[in-house]
Image (spheres, grey):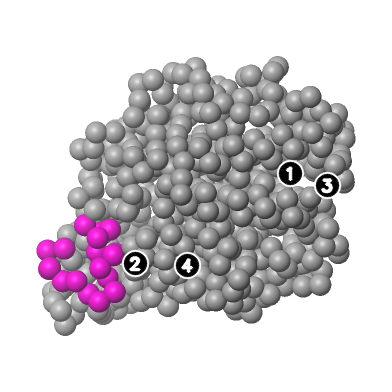
Amino acid sequence: MLTNLPATHEEFAKLSWAEIEPFAQALIERPLTAETADEWLLDWTSLARQIDEAKTRLEVGTTLDTTDEALNQRYLANLENVVTPWRAAEQKLKEKLLASGLEPAGFEIPLRAIRAEAALFREANLTLFNEEDRLETEYDRVIGAQTVIWDGEEKTLTQLTPFLESQDRDLRERAFRLAAERRLQDRPALNDLWHKFLDVRHQIALNADQPDYRAYKWIEMKRFDYTPDDARRFHAAIEEVVVPAGRRLLERKRERMGVDVLRPWDADWRMTIDPLNRPPLAPFKDGAELTAKSTAMFRQVDPKFGEYLDIMERDSMLDLVNRKGKAPGGYQTYFAVQKRPFIFMNATGSHGDVQTMLHEGGHAFHSFESMHLPYYQQGDITMEIAEVASMSMELLAAPYLTADYGGFYVSQADADRAFVDHLTGLIRFWGYMSVVDGFQHWVYTHIDDAHDIAQCDAKWVELWNRFMPVEDWSGFEDSLNAYWQRQGHIYGNPFYYIEYGLAQLGAVQVWRNSLSDAKGAVAAYRQALSLGATRTLPELFAAAGAKFAFDEAIFREVVPLIEDTINRLDG
């Protein structure tokens, strides 16, 4: 066994690579046989977890405060001085395992991933990975610094959310215009970053002998169970079945609002603007209330889930409220040594924040449910099933939104309204997902064209009109053109978006199952989560009670259920 390996992440974080390398070298040199394989993999796991947690804690820190230059430099130094040499050392460990011919029990799927990773590895890409991480941090810094003056007070763009959901249409327009103008000020900086991202990613693909970055990314993201052609089939099915449903819902909204056309401040893809001019939902006042009521709802779904969030609150694993200098968006990550998930959010008091909490909570529960797996690689969960965990939780928790269950709303009418908004946004989201995913397919298979910002804008609008053909953006064409630069995944997590669409389809099937057997659906959900990365995607979806599919047929099963539920609750 590895001896003298620091027991805590705090101790390990102080080590230089010169102090870490002997542990890696000992593993590389140690004999690997059927008799020693378990201990060898456990030691690899221990070392990998320490390195991963050190990096993750620094990365989280840079998102908590994008203005902390010293922390940012520590993060970049860790990437260069520890993560890069570790990636090279880990390649030798992968090659050693593959050369042994061993297939440890429960390691079949991780071994498939290791074969692909080992074949894709090129030492020349290690510095490019660091440069990509640096660019991602810079993108966060640009977006995190976007503030405006609203009635004499500086606010982040996220803090404009209550005004963008106001009953007052003129107020919504004013907030929209202010945010749009502020975003456009950063176009030069974002354009410059875009060119750098493209150059780095294209070179990564070429170094790995791949025809383009999409081909490279497909392997890196372990997409063994579907192809780019399947993704295009998925887009086409959405266009055929889901987009018409979206049109019906939005036309109904337009009629109820009594307007000739919907404008961007009337209906974003989240569908949060109330057509009957009711006051915006105000589910909570602060992070403590968000945590307490979310915990109560999770406990209703399954007592274990409430216990998990209690643990996270006790261990300071929640940072939920928006503030200046904080990176945008929300995420869940995992501290592998401490064995704790961490949730990052930018809550301002809207129902969208409740949905984000339920979503990220589902991710956190995935971490808890699968942490029993002994080997690091068994927890390397692909995003498709990870998003089933999060999106299913949004739907499974929905029946418990009222105060009767400890939830956020006194009246059932408000809870129903929130759920209708969620289901309507779900329909709308499949179209938006197709825009984002289709855009990235075009970018990385037309790399020269994608260097032309005008062509990027044109492709984005083309896809928008195909999948999101409702709002009138007259007078705001520049904002629509540049909308793709608001989507952080396009900059920071390339090709990570179709997972949301596939997982939403899985999650709706889990929800459908819960309508007739709530306990059985939750039990299947937990079973799927407990499997980590030890099964194929079709097998994991099946364990959760869902079909892994791309075709029109599956949409024709679930879209009517969604529309019927909306009509029943909001007739």
Residue on which disc 2 sits: 535
Q: Amino acid at mark 1?
A: Thr
Tell whether 444 sits left or right of 24. right
Q: Are marks 3 and 4 in contact (CB under 8 Å)?
A: no
Task: Using the numbered discs, state the Cα–Cα distance from disc 3 to disc 1 in whole angstroms.
Answer: 8 Å
Which residue is depicted at the point 29% across and 74% down?
A: 106
- Residue 465 vertical position relative to residue 142 in the rendered view, above or below: above
Q: Which of labels 4 and 2 is toward the front?
A: 4
Residue on which disc 4 sits: 545
Tell whether 21 sits left or right of 533. left
Secondary element at tag 4 = loop
**Magenta segment:** 98-115
In the image shown, does 136 or 479 lie closer to the viewer?
479
Task: Using the numbered discs, state the Cα–Cα distance from disc 2 to disc 3 in whole angstroms.
Answer: 43 Å
Q: Earlier in the sequence, mark 2 or mark 3?
A: 3
Q: Main secondary structure of the magenta part?
A: helix
Task: Using the numbered discs, state the Cα–Cα distance from disc 4 to disc 2 in whole angstroms.
Answer: 14 Å
Residue on which disc 1 sits: 272
